Amino acid sequence: MTVRVGVNGFGTIGKRVADAVARQPDLKLVGIAKTRPSFEAQRAVDHGYSLYVAGEGSAEKFAAVGLPVAGRLPDLLAQVDVMIDATPEEVGRANRPLYEAAGVRAIFQGGEEADVAEGSFSALANYEACRGKRTLRVVSCNTTGITRAAAVLLPRWGVEHWEVTLVRRAADPGESKRGPVDGIVPTLDVPSHHGPDAQTVLPGLPIATTAVVVPTTLMHVHVNHVRLRRAPAEAAEVVEAFRGTPRFHVFAPWERVDGTPQVMEFARDRWGRDGIRGPDMMENVLWERGVSVHGPDVHFFQAIHQESIVIPENIDAIRAMLELADGPTSIATTDRALGIGRARGAARPRAAAATPVRRKA
Ligand code: NAD
C-alpha cells in the first residue's frame, strides 16, 4: 500500500517533511502547498514537487515569476490520504476544517495547542496510543527531545522527579525578525509550557520545566536533573541505554565536541553520507562525559536541533494513523530512509567504545 501525502506550508519544517516523505518506500509525496512565490517555492519545483496554491495565495503571482502550479489546496486535498500541516502556529487550527471537510487525515505541528488533534505524538514514547487516530499533533522540538529521553529512562529505572532547564535558541538560522540578539530572556512562567506539553504525550510524567532564551540559532540545550526510582549501577549504564536507542547520538570524549558549534559542524560534515538530508541533526544529542550518576540522581545535557528533530516523527505519525506498521518497524523504516543511525555507527569506530566514562563521586 502506498499512502498519498500532501504538505501544507513549506518553511523550515514543511520542506524537510516533504523531503522525508519523498524518501519513504511506502509513502508518495503528491504535492506541497504554499501561499506565495519565494526561493522555497522555487526549491519545491526544482525538487520535482507539484506546487499548489494555499490560503489566500494567488496563482497569478506564481505564474508571473514562472513557477508552475498544479492547482489550489482543495485540488491537492482531493488526491491525498494524509495532509501534513506545517504552517505557522494557529494557522494549522484554522486549516483543520478544510481537512475535515475533505475527509483527509491530518497531522499538525507543535505550535498548535494540544486540542487541535485527537492525540499528541512522539514516536518512541506513545506510538501505540496513537494508532488509528484521524488527527495527530507532532509535539514541538523541545517536547520531542524530552519525551524521547523519557522513553529511555521510564521503562528502565522509573522517574521519581525530573527538573529540566531549557536553554532555547532565539531564532532559526533563516529568520531575521526574532531575538534577542543580545541578552538572556528568562521565561517567567513556571513551569514553562514544555512540561505540561510533555504530559500530553506521557500523562503523569513528573517533570518541571524552566526556560531561558539565548542569542543563538543553532540548537537548544536541555540541562536535566532526574531522580530515578531505581538507581543505575553506574553512568555507563545510562550512557549505553541512550546510545543503544534509535534517534540518540552520544558523542564520546575523543570526538572533541565541546558544544553546539561542533555538533552542527558534525552535521554539515556528514551531509550526503548514507543519504542524510541536509546539515540536519534529527537525533537527541548527548555527551557521554555529561552524563553523571549519584545514586538515583542522574544529570545529563542534551542538544536539540530544532529545525529537524520532529521530521522523523511526522513520518512515523503517518504510519501510526494508518496502522501501517508497529512502532519499532516504523522507526527503523523511517531512519533507514533518512540515513539516521548508519551515520552514528560510521562516526564511532569500534575502539572508541572503550573510552572510560567519567563517574562523579
Ligand atoms: P515557517 O515560518 O518556517 O514556515 C511556515 C510556512 O508556512 C511559511 O513558508 C509560510 O509562508 C507558510 N504559510 C503561512 N500561512 C500559510 C497558509 N495559510 N497556508 C499554507 N502555508 C502558509 O514555520 P516553521 O518553523 O516551519 O513552523 C511550522 C510549525 O512547526 C509551527 O507549528 C511550529 O511551531 C512548528 N515547529 C517549528 C520548529 C522550529 O524550530 N522551526 C520546530 C518544531 C516545530
Image (cartoon, grey):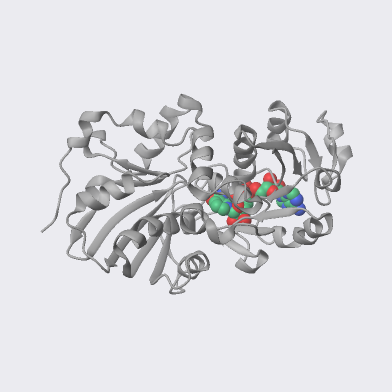
Specify whether residue 11 is in view: yes
Give 189 or 303, whichever is nearer the viewer: 303
Q: Quadrant of residue 269?
A: top left
Give 82 or 111, whichever is nearer the viewer: 82
Tell whether 300 sits left or right of 355.
right
**Residue drawn at x 84%, y 46% as measured from the top left:** 78
Tell whether 354 sits left or right of 315.
left
Give 19 or 304, whichever is nearer the viewer: 19
**Residue drawn at x 29%, y 62% as measured from the top left:** 157
Is the N terminus in the top left, top right, bottom left or bottom right quadrant? top right
Tell whether 100 sits left or right of 281.
right
Q: Position of residue 116 (x, y in %)?
A: 67, 65
Position of residue 322 relative to residue 45, above or below, is: below
Specify whether residue 110 is in view: no
Position of residue 73 relative to residue 264, above or below, is: below
Q: Position of residue 134 (x, y in %)?
A: 69, 58
Q: Residue furthest left?
A: 361
Q: Position of residue 6 (x, y in %)?
A: 73, 43
Q: Position of residue 244 (x, y in %)?
A: 33, 44
**Residue drawn at x 26%, y 48% as measured from the top left:** 239
Is the C terminus in the top left, top right, bottom left or bottom right quadrant? bottom left
